């Protein structure tokens, strides 16, 4: 069975998603359906990476220089701690050689809703301000490509 992702921006795509669910139910019993809120905006994504880049460039954390990916994980942990529900708590287990821990939680920045992304950016900004980070602005988009047709909102993975 092919994985399909629909961005529900009009009635036609809603109907197509329903049609695919019915087909999966009949042809592939036990198929799973996941419904998520809207993705974060590309502006918010650019702002996050810009801020993480500023932090990575300017700060040393407990004697270590972290890259943007590591800082993203540190900030996602702060976001998880910001929320009080269990799904947001970090899930640590010892690594296989006993020298540290591995987070086996499944939170990824790409899964954040718009509201969660706003909260993450607030946490990153507050942390950077406390540490004296000098912020640069996100690079301008400069992408003048036309908006894709509605068909582009159905992904086949």
Image: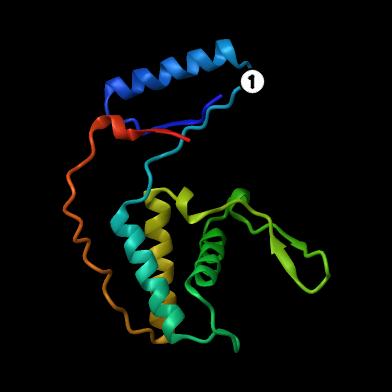
Residue found farthest to the top = 26
Type of colouring: rainbow
- In the rendered view, would you say 129 is above or below 75? below
Residue at the image position 51 percent from the left and 30 percent from the top:
3
Q: Position of residue 149 (x, y in %)?
A: 23, 33
Residue at the image position 58 percent from the left and 12 percent from the top:
27
- In the rendered view, would you say 146 is above or below 24? below
Q: Position of residue 1 (x, y in %)?
A: 56, 24
Q: Position of residue 51 (x, y in %)?
A: 37, 72
Query: Residue 80 falls in which quadrant of the image?
Result: bottom right
Residue highlighted by disc 1: 30
Residue placed most toward the observer, 96 or 131: 96
Residue at the image position 29 percent from the left and 78 percent from the top:
136
Q: Position of residue 35 (x, y in %)?
A: 47, 32
Residue placed most toward the observer, 98 or 115: 98
Residue 106 is left or right of residue 57, and the answer is: right
Residue 119 is left or right of residue 2, and the answer is: left
Instruction: Give the number of marks.
Output: 1
Query: Residue 140 falls in which quadrant of the image?
Result: bottom left
Q: Badge 1: few (under 14), some or many (20 or more) residues near its Cα, within 10 Å?
A: few
Residue at the image position 36 percent from the left and 59 percent from the top:
45
Residue found farthest to the bottom = 63
Give the structural element (helix, strand or loop) at label 1: loop
Residue 142 is left or right of residue 72, and the answer is: left
């Amino acid at each position: 069975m092919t994985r399909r992702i629909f961005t529900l921006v009009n009635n036609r795509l809603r109907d197509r998603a329903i049609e695919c669910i019915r087909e999966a139910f009949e042809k592939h019993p036990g198929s799973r359906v996941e419904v998520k809120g809207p993705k974060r905006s590309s502006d918010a994504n650019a702002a996050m990476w810009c801020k993480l880049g500023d932090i990575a460039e300017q700060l040393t954390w407990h004697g270590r220089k972290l890259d943007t990916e590591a800082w993203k994980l540190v900030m996602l942990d702060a976001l998880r701690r910001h929320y009080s529900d269990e799904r947001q708590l970090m899930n640590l287990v010892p690594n296989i050689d006993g020298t540290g821990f591995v987070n086996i939680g499944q939170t990824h920045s790409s899964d954040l809703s718009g509201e969660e992304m706003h909260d993450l950016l607030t946490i990153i900004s507050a942390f950077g301000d406390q540490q004296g980070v000098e912020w640069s602005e996100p690079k301008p988009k400069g992408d003048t490509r036309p908006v894709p047709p509605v068909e582009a909102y159905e992904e086949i993975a």
